[in-house]
Image (cartoon, rainbow, N blue to C red):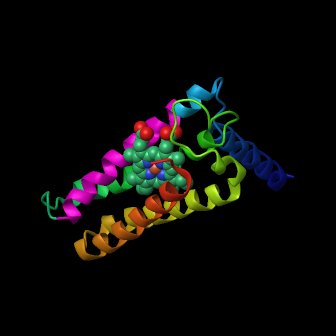
């Protein structure tokens, strides 16, 4: 009985978390604003790591680890907002095809979630060579989706 209760409570908690992650948007513009905001933040913190990797900024281990952690967290956010009804119309660079290929879009999103999580892990070690390699892999996952599902 105790066990059943515990799983029940656990289930409710999980539903709550998914409920939040599956953000509901009153208007398509809200979904567009949300995902553009998330993407802008991802781009900002990702390019800070990029500057270090390219030797344009000094390597501060703590700063890179923090940026990588932020990118990994932020990368879990925007995907539902791309799939909101009517979200391919309006001020957006999302290709309409993305909504016809939700599985493909999701797979591209999952790749970035996985690669940025890995980047966060390696950034914590402070090994710049490994960070460089993983930054490349993560960047490739961003590009893969942009080429397929973004107008430019
Ligand atoms: C699954 C697809 C997908 C992945 C993965 C993805 N993006 Fe995007 N990104 C998009 C789309 C689509 C847009 C256009 C958003 C819009 O206009 O509604 C966009 C827009 C952007 C923008 C411009 C934001 C704006 O205001 O229009 C930046 C910067 C960006 N992405 C960076 C990144 C980075 C960095 C990564 C990897 C860490 C990444 N993206 C991964 C699909 C993706």
Residue 25 drawn above or below residue 39: above
Question: Residue at the location (58% across, 32% down)?
Answer: 31
Residue 91 drawn above or below residue 150: above
In depth, the one of 46 and 125 nearer the eye is 46
Total numbered badges shown on the rendered structure: 0
Q: Is residue 90 visible in the rendered structure shown here?
A: yes
Question: Residue at the location (54% across, 43% down)?
Answer: 78
Q: Is the magenta stretch mostly helix, strand or loop?
A: helix
Residue 14 drawn above or below residue 56: above
Q: Outermost residue toward the right?
A: 1
Give x and y (percent) for residue 63.
23, 53
Q: Is residue 74 visible in the rendered structure shown here?
A: no
In depth, the one of 87 and 70 nearer the eye is 87
Give x and y (percent) for residue 94.
55, 43
Question: Residue at the location (49% across, 63% down)?
Answer: 144
In depth, the one of 99 and 60 nearer the eye is 99
Residue 106 drawn above or below residue 38: below
In depth, the one of 134 and 107 nearer the eye is 107
Quadrant of residue 81 in the image? top right
Give x and y (percent) for residue 6.
76, 50
Q: Does the magenta stretch include residue 48?
A: yes
Q: In this view, does 81 lie to the left or right of 38?
A: right
Question: Residue at the location (14% across, 59% down)?
Answer: 56
Q: Outermost residue toward the top?
A: 26
Give x and y (percent) for residue 126.
25, 68
Quadrant of residue 123 in the image? bottom left
Bounds of the magenta segment: 33-54
């Amino acid at each position: 009985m105790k066990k059943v209760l515990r799983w029940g409570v656990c289930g409710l908690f999980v539903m709550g978390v998914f409920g939040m992650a599956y953000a509901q948007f009153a208007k398509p513009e809200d979904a567009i604003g949300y995902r553009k905001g998330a993407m802008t933040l991802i781009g900002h913190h990702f390019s800070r790591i990029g500057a270090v990797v390219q030797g344009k900024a000094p390597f501060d281990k703590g700063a890179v680890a923090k940026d990588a952690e932020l990118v990994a967290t932020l990368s879990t956010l925007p995907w539902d907002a791309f799939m909101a009804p009517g979200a391919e119309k309006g001020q957006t660079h999302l290709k309409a095809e993305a909504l016809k290929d939700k599985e493909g879009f999701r797979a591209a999103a999952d790749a970035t979630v996985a690669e940025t999580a890995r980047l966060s892990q390696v950034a914590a070690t402070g090994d710049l060579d490994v960070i460089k390699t993983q930054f490349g892999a993560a960047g490739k996952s961003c590009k893969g989706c942009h080429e397929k599902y973004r107008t430019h």
